[in-house]
Image: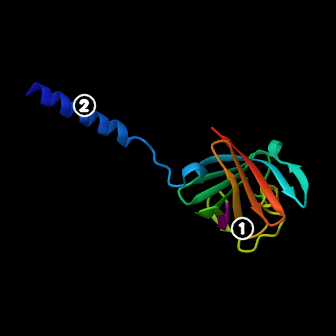
Amino acid sequence: MKRYIYIIVILAGLLIAGSCDKLPMNSRLDGMWQLKTIIKNSQEKDRQDAGICWSFQLKLCQITYMKGLFDGASNIANARFFKKNDSLFISDIHLNFRNRDSLIAAPTSTIFEEAGITGPQEGFKIITLNKKTMLLENGNKKLLFRKLE
């Protein structure tokens, strides 16, 4: 009888310990990515010192500009994203303010250009996505990211 109690206690402990694991719904995309380089028309623009990060969790992408402001107003933009196979779509971009979020219906190319986004909806092809790097491509533009741990 004691043997069964020990087995039940061990199984219960394993179930409890296993239930604390997070299973990311976006696999390798989940987490915070620092924008390192924007390559546009074969010209590289180093963005590593700008402190621009894209964070993916559930269906939300938060773009943080740590050393500047988007449109002179906010350093955080929230957007919805959809990942399917090797494609990533960004839409519904909102500038984050303390008391409200403001939907950017038709952003000019200058508002989010520093973060690599040039329209209210942006689609990217995922060229590389592993534990350390991500490379996104949209026509003549490529965005190179490194994963922050």
Looking at the rendered structure, the kind of residue marked 1 is Glu
Q: Can you give x and y, in whole percent of width and height, for residue 89 in the image?
A: 65, 66
Q: Which SS class for mark 1? A: strand
- The span shown in magenta is 88-95
Quarter-of-image position of residue 119: bottom right
- Residue at point 78%, 61% (across, down): 112
Predominant secondary structure, magenta span: strand
Q: Quadrant of the C terminus?
A: top right
Q: Can you give x and y, in whole percent of width and height, for residue 129 in the image?
A: 66, 50
- Residue at point 61%, 63% (across, down): 81
Location of mark 1 (residue): 122
Q: How is the image coloured?
A: rainbow
Q: Which SS class for mark 2? A: helix
Residue 74 visible in the shown view: no
Residue 80 visible in the shown view: yes
Looking at the rendered structure, the kind of residue marked 2 is Ile
Say which label, 1 or 2, has the lower sequence index: 2
Location of mark 2 (residue): 10
